[in-house]
Amino acid sequence: MVIYPIFYTIFVSFTNYGTGHILSKEQVIEQFENQYYLSEDSATYTYQAFKNNYGDLKVILYSLNDESYLCENEKKIIKVNLSDSRFIDIDKDGIIDQFDGYKKLDKIQIIQSLNELQNLIFKKDEYFIKLVSLTEFKVYSKKYQFDSLEDRLLDLKNGIIYYPIEGYFVSEQGERLAPGFRVSIGFKNFIRLIKSPQISNPFLRVFGWTFLWAFLSVITTFALGLTLAIVLNDPYLKLRKIYRTLLILPYSIPAFISCLIWRGFFNTEVGIVNRILNNYFQVIIPWLQDPIWAKVALVIVNLWLGFPYMMIITLGALQSIPFELGEAASIDGASRWQQFKNITFPLLLVSLAPLLIGSFAFNFNNFNVIYLVTQGRPAIPGAGTPAGSTDILISYTYRLAFEGVRGNQWGLASAVSLIIFIIVAIISAIGFRYTKALEEISKNV
């Protein structure tokens, strides 16, 4: 269940899979071969419809040269002689009233059965017969025929030949038939991310902001969490348990609820943040409309969501550091800042470095905060893809896959997903190597 999506994403990233290229080549060929056209000199048939007591439908077609055909299903159309005794004309008016338990439908009954009649397709030689009006069937000719030996699609109506080129059937004049089909396109999705200006420019902006977002998220939450942990670690602080409980509350509220509440707080017109700023400083900030302020809003929201976690793990790490180390340093004349800088902080990093690396990787893909607060917006002007100023790579991938103005681009989105995977893997490898270095430092403290 884990391995299959990974390998499927890798496979899709090397294809043109997306809107207009969802079906396989075989499925597209089948669609084209099921298309028919009505020529100007097409043969016309009048008809009579019949039903039995079970609701089964049969049709008798009458050609202009007085030939009659009994149609039971698309594979069975039989030329019949209406003078046969099985066909009964009760009132002797020359019109068949019933046969084999089937009774003729009147006009009202035909109208009631119109949907069934419209769905009937009868095959006669290389042609198909379909209902065209309330009183007539006509012969339709097949429009396309696929030549498997030459790997080409023939337009039987216009005499044009189409060849499969990069996921489309294309004529020699460059005319392209839709829909297209899935094909392997190699590294073209990755090349588009680099060489196509309409894609590469917004992609590089999203790429850079993703790293900055993850860095700011870790630094701000860790700084505030560390500060609060140091304060709460003081055994002489009054009401310490109450403060600790209150500060953990943001962590206990589901993140998606907090994000939606903060989105309301940052509403430019009616949000409480702008109401306070306007009342005291006569300032209104376009939190969700301006690219810079939207990023500031996201950092604030993530700070609210993330500092309790950092506070909890830092508080636990502080309490695991032997108290005697601080006492010995104090006796040697070290100030509290020197104790923190040279003893406490290095030992904290040994314990917390893997968690900080994990936090960086988590925020690198923190889809919920981005999408629930800003939805990746405001949009980047001139972008050829649905890229926003606050999009990170994961939200950009989602919008490529499901919110594209030109349709869903699953192949391109998968290529971005593969890039995300590689980046996170590299960051994790570097981070854990750095953790080993910190462990060596701790042995010498």
Image: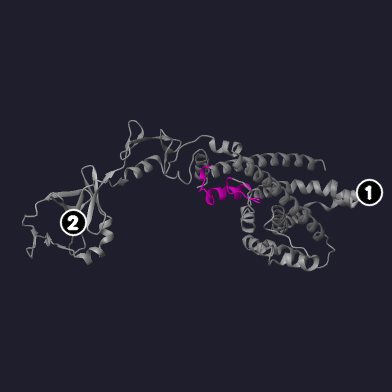
Label 2 crowd bin: few (<14), some (14–19), many (20+), radius 10 Å: some
Q: Nearer the viewer, residue 347 or 24?
A: 24
Label 1 crowd bin: few (<14), some (14–19), many (20+), radius 10 Å: few
Q: Nearer the viewer, residue 351 or 22?
A: 22
Q: Which residues are magenta?
A: 384-411
Tell me if residue 269 comes above or below residue 354 in the rendering. Answer: below
User: Badge 2 is on which residue?
Assistant: 47
Q: Where does the image place residue 443, in percent across and percent down from the top left?
A: 79, 41
Tell me if residue 284 comes above or below residue 424 in the rendering. Answer: below
Amino acid type of disc 2? Answer: Tyr
The answer to whether 18 appears left or right of 355 in the picture is: left
Secondary-structure class at tag 1? loop
Secondary-structure class at tag 2? strand
Q: Is residue 365 magenta?
A: no
User: Badge 1 is on which residue?
Assistant: 333
Amino acid type of disc 1? Answer: Gly
Q: Where does the image place residue 342, in percent across and percent down from the top left?
A: 85, 46
Report which quarter residue 243 is drawn in.
bottom right
Report which quarter residue 33 is drawn in.
top left
Q: Which residue is most to the right?
A: 333
The answer to whether 111 appears left or right of 401 in the picture is: left
Label drawn at residue 225: none
Q: Is residue 398 magenta?
A: yes
